[in-house]
């Protein structure tokens, strides 16, 4: 689904990503873990054409999409749900959702996708006329994910979807992620909520200081002494 080859990314003269390589296979949930400032968001932004890489390649479904504009990647089937969620506060829930299908002109399909999102998040249906700016944090996160789904994506890239959510809402978001995979959507997820994430992801990459320092099946990482000590707060 997605292949990243030796990506180097810098902001001005400051190099952030160093030789980052990853593979996300069809139907997988792959987690990207790592401390604050490790370069996780930068990686997602450079995949999405928001930060151009200095060198390296990004392939989506076998095609070289390195540095392609964000809207082009969206059209090809990648939904990106950024950390800052980018909800239009003065628009209603439903208007926000419809924006996610902006490049689709098939009204019947759009209606079908909207129904699908409302099935997944009944709360959004209940609140469809409400101004997005008055939704709670958890509801806004559902809205951001729902808007991503309006493009009927093959790959959903989520940047810290559980950030700022109550434990119940974290469960709602992770349940949604599991449902998406059951519907043949592939997921790449950046998370700090490690134990929950390793519970749903099939594989994970650990990034530190802009480089991949570890990768493997989630179970293996969850049992790794270094990961336990550094990330799960468990003494050995
Ligand atoms: N636009 C920018 N200009 C300069 N430096 C930046 C810019 N954006 C991010 N950085 C720096 O790049 C490094 C990586 O940031 P990034 O946001 O990718 O980290 P992250 O792993 O997502 O962290 P977090 O877990 O806190 O979200 C940080 O040191 C950050 O200060
Ligand atoms: Mg980040």
Image (cartoon, rainbow, N blue to C red):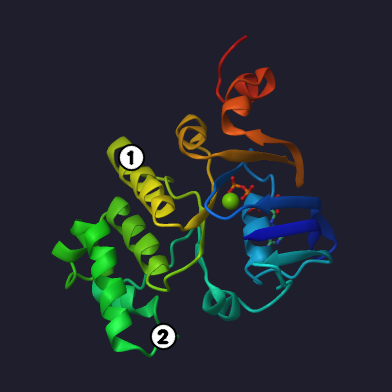
**Residue indicated by mark 2:** 104
Secondary element type, mark 2: loop
Q: Quadrant of the C terminus?
A: top right
Total numbered circles: 2
Is the residue 56 above or below the residue 163 in the image? below
Is the residue 213 above or below the residue 74 in the image? above
Give the residue drawn at x 25%, y 74%. Answer: 94
* Quarter where residue 212 is shown: top right
Q: Quadrant of the N terminus?
A: bottom right
Label located before the other in sequence (1 or 2):
2
Does mark 2 have its CB less than 8 Å from ligand 2?
Answer: no
Residue 38: x and y, percent? 69, 44
One can see residue 92 in this view? no
Give the residue drawn at x 53%, y 39%. Answer: 192
Disc 1 vs disc 2: which is toward the camera?
2
**Residue indicated by mark 1:** 171
Residue 84: x and y, percent? 47, 60
Residue at the far left: name it: 126
Secondary element type, mark 1: helix
Q: Residues within 10 Å of mark 1 (few under 14, many from 20)?
A: some
Residue 92: x and y, percent? 24, 74
Alpha carbons under labels 1 and 2: distance apart: 31 Å
* Quarter where residue 225 is shown: top right
Give the residue drawn at x 71%, y 66%. Answer: 59
Give the residue drawn at x 45%, y 33%. Answer: 196
Q: Residues within 10 Å of mark 2 (few under 14, many from 20)?
A: some
Q: Is residue 189 left or right of residue 176?
A: right
């Amino acid at each position: 689904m997605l292949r990243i080859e030796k990506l180097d990314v810098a902001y001005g003269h400051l190099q952030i990503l160093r030789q980052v390589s990853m593979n996300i296979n069809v139907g997988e949930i792959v987690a990207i873990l790592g401390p604050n400032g490790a370069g996780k968001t930068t990686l997602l932004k450079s995949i999405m054409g928001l930060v151009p890489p200095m060198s390296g390649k990004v392939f989506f479904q076998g095609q070289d999409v390195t540095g392609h504009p964000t809207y082009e990647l969206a059209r090809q089937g990648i939904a990106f749900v950024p950390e800052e969620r980018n909800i239009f506060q003065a628009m209603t829930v439903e208007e926000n959702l419809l924006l996610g299908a902006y490049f689709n002109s098939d009204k019947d399909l759009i209606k079908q996708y909207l129904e699908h999102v409302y099935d997944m998040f009944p709360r959004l249906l209940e609140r469809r006329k409400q101004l997005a700016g008055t939704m709670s944090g958890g509801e806004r996160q559902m809205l951001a994910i729902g808007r991503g789904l309006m493009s009927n994506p093959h790959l959903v890239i989520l940047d810290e979807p559980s950030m700022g959510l109550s434990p119940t809402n974290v469960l709602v978001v992770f349940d949604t992620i599991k449902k998406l995979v059951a519907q043949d959507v592939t997921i790449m997820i950046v998370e700090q909520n490690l134990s929950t994430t390793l519970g749903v992801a099939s594989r994970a990459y650990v990034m530190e200081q802009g480089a991949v320092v570890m990768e493997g099946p989630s179970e293996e990482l969850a049992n790794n002494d270094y990961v336990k000590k550094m990330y799960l707060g468990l003494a050995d």
